[in-house]
Image (cartoon, coloured by chain):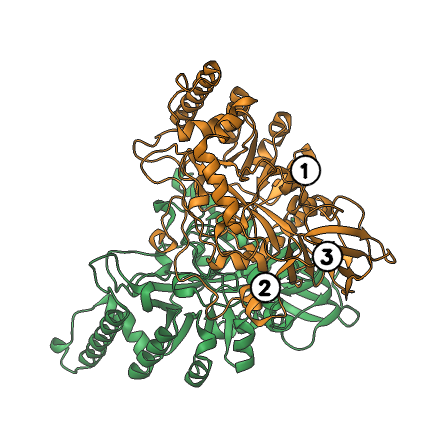
Chain colours: A green, B orange
Amino acid sequence: MKKSARYFVTLTCLLAATTVAEDIVVHGAIIHTMAGATIRDGVVLIRGGKIESVGEAASVKIPAGWRVLKAKVVTPGLIDAHTVVGFSGILNQPQDQEQLEKSAPLQPDLRAIDAYNGRDPLVEYVRSFGVTTLHTGHGPGALISGQTMIVKTYPPNLDLALINPAAMTAATLGSGAKAEKDKAPGTASKAVAMFRAELIKAEDYVAKGKKSDIEKRPARDLRLEVLARALDGEQRLLITVHRHQDVIAALRLAAEFKLRIVLDGVSDAPLVLDEIKKSGFPVFLHPTMYRANNETENLSIETASKLRNAGIPFALQSGFENYVPKTRIVLFEAAIAAANGLSQSDALAAITIDAAKLLGIQQRTGSLEIGKDADLALYDGDPFEYTTHCTGVVVSGVVTDVQPH
Amino acid sequence: MLLPSMIRFRPAFLAFLAAVFGGAVLAPAQETPLALIGAQLICVSGETHEEGVLVVHRGKIIIVGPRGTALPAGATTRDVRGQIIMPGLVDTHSHIGSPAGGDQSAPIQPDTRVLDAVDVRDASIQKAQAGGLTTANIMPGSGHLISGQTLYVKLRDGNTIDDLLITDKAGRVAGGLKMANGTNSRKDPPFPGTRAKSAALVREKFIAAREYREKIVRAKGDVDKLPPRDLALEILVEVLERQRVVHHHTHRHDDILTVLRLQKEFGFRVVLHHVSDAWKVSEEIAAANVPCSIILLDSPGGKLEARDVDWKNGVALEKAGVPVGFHTDDPVTDSRLFLRSAAFAVRAGMSRAGALRALTLTGAEMLDLQARIGSLEVGKDADFILLSGDPFSVYTHVLETYVDGVKVFDREKEKDRRWSTGGYGAGNPRAAHLCCFGTWEEAR
């Protein structure tokens, strides 16, 4: 056998060995399906990577010979609504930081799929607490930093783990958008002006692209192509903003260009609840334990409950950290929200089914329902308690973690 | 030894002491005894009382006992059934008040004092009170081999830093010395470029301090024979005399052993801080009989030398017999969530009793303050907190914080509550300052 062929066979076998979905029975004293009532003494049957049935143990026929996992509490696999895991690597050194390219302020053409490292230790780390899906990619810190994607935390092979290769386009307004000194944008106003100019360019690009005379159509432009997808609503803009005036600026921008946006971060959300509610746009709220300084100085650990009470759709996220912790764990962010005004079920929804809906992946994951991907997290107690351990994780029907963490 | 007292009683230092004492304003504690009745009392040094009685008077604890313990005449009583009272938390490593010690001019600056740089109006101090902290070791950063003198403070409501100081009977302001090795203190000259160079520079300086001390001893009090006063060396002399504890930032296993080697050579007292790789060398740390103040982070990494930091450090050190304390390293972790750090150590296998002691009495021991604070004992300072539930539950809130018998945080009061939850006006308009990345914003 030729050397290259041998490698190919080996590789194929390895992939097969690590990605095979088993037939599994997950037995839970409490199962939070996030689709209807909590089940006591229930089971989830998993076959071919999908959920085959969910119900009370007494009412579900359990096939013989299937692998059995038991836990006190079972939840859907957790979804981190916005992170940079896989991009901002554990070492925090230039060679493992892919979340921000600083050479230009507007780079919507940067694709997330071209930089994701599914083997960064932080991917496995967050998974070990029950996180099975990441909305990750280019981070905040540039006017438009690039695109994001949605990926499972297993397997490390991107092609096998990918759910959506181009989920959103990541943008930042406010002082977070400022470029290095003497470069534009240097102010919040300049950031908006540049954003508007670029969107107008994209509108023009779209209009010219429709001309019947092929000679009059513009040359292909990767940047404007992506913004065109924002203009027609196909690819939403994820706009990171913290100060109340910047939130309003983002809403103004969305209204002017009829954009579909997600407000990200939003430390000052409690100051502009009515405006956010009226816009109809969802919020990916800053990590509950995010540091309060500069733009984020007014953040509150009670904001999630205020969004809930105002009827604003939201999800929780681990966000981006430039130092330590190199990533937060979205489970812990939800836990602190649950301890500070949000109900336990709403907190769990914010990292499962609500996050799935806001990311447009609710057909695949986010709840324990027949036909959905078998993404589950197992715990030996209340998942939010500090001293509870995650005792098992299943991603797409593969048991990835069984060591208590 | 004679020497430190000789230094202490130089006229300049006396003037300094006078300034400190002249400026110190003790907040009023209760003139009538305050009795808190019915809470579970986690005393740390003694048994836990399920429905106990705690009485404080004039800033001190005067009674700790089980239900039915007789109260002093005229005591104000409060029914606090359903709550938990434990000693105020001791943070052995914090940067609240955003102080900087040494500047970028040199890697060794023991002459700089955090005392001269703490902003007592910084929101981080109120937030620490909201987290149940009553004592903190405020440190300069880790971007130097020796970045300056640390300051042990009581988190009283202060108008100036003098109101927060802790002084001994001789009037000495309590504090240690911050040192660091590993990568934070490595940079362009005059800073060291390698680990070996870092150790060499430190050894050179301590040897100079030894010689300085010997010159002073040989002078036998003769002013003409005394060496010129050296602010840096006289602090290192205090360290050599074991009067000032070294608080040593260190992460990697080999850096930890380097600290132990230096400690052996110079005989100083040291607390290891962070100690990311502690679980790899816990036996060596135990053999050196050196305590560790550890940090628990939501995730490892952030830099190469902290790649392997693990929650199991608590249990690994506890099993090896090493005294363990915790720290926030605020703003690295949030003082309001200090209990959470201990809870994660318990999650990874540390005993509950060990984790409770680490938060309080063991921390106090690391600051030489165990005679005054760290447990609910008669005669100790009335530093304690009221909790809504189990100290290690996420759903528990710090309800009240007392320092020297004075309530400095009350969650029932809207103004105080905001320090606990955050919200408009509760933040810092400035970025937090870090050792080696500049501000958070610059680091990005």
Q: Nearer the viewer, residue A128 or B144?
A: B144
Q: Nearer the viewer, residue A153 or A245?
A: A245
Q: Nearer the viewer, mark 3 or mark 1?
A: 3
Q: Earlier in the sequence, mark 3 or mark 1?
A: 3
Kind of element beneath mark 2 = helix
Q: Which residue is mark 2?
A: A336
* Residue type, label 3: Ile
Task: List x then y, in percent, for residue A153.
Answer: 51, 57
Q: What label does residue B364 carry, if any?
A: none
Task: List x then y, in percent, for residue A209.
Answer: 20, 78
User: Residue at (36%, 51%) from the top-left corner?
Assistant: B443
Assess disc 1: are there few (<14), some (14-19) or many (≥20) residues with their C-alpha within 10 Å of its C-alpha: some
- Horizontally, is A18 left or right of A107 in the view? right
Callouts 2 and 1 in the same chain: no
Label 2: chain letter: A
Q: Which residue is mark 1?
A: B318
Whether tag 3 and tag 1 are in contact, CB under 8 A, the answer is no
Q: Which residue extends farthest top?
A: B218
Task: Give above or below for A57 relative to A280.
Answer: above
Label 3: chain letter: B
Cα–Cα gap, marks 2 and 3: 22 Å
Cα–Cα gap, marks 3 and 1: 24 Å
Task: List x then y, in percent, for residue B307.
Answer: 49, 42
* Residue type, label 1: Glu
Q: Which residue is mark 3?
A: B85
Rendered image quadrant of residue A330: bottom right
Task: Give above or below for A250 relative to A108.
Answer: below
Cα–Cα gap, marks 2 and 1: 28 Å
* Residue type, label 2: Ile
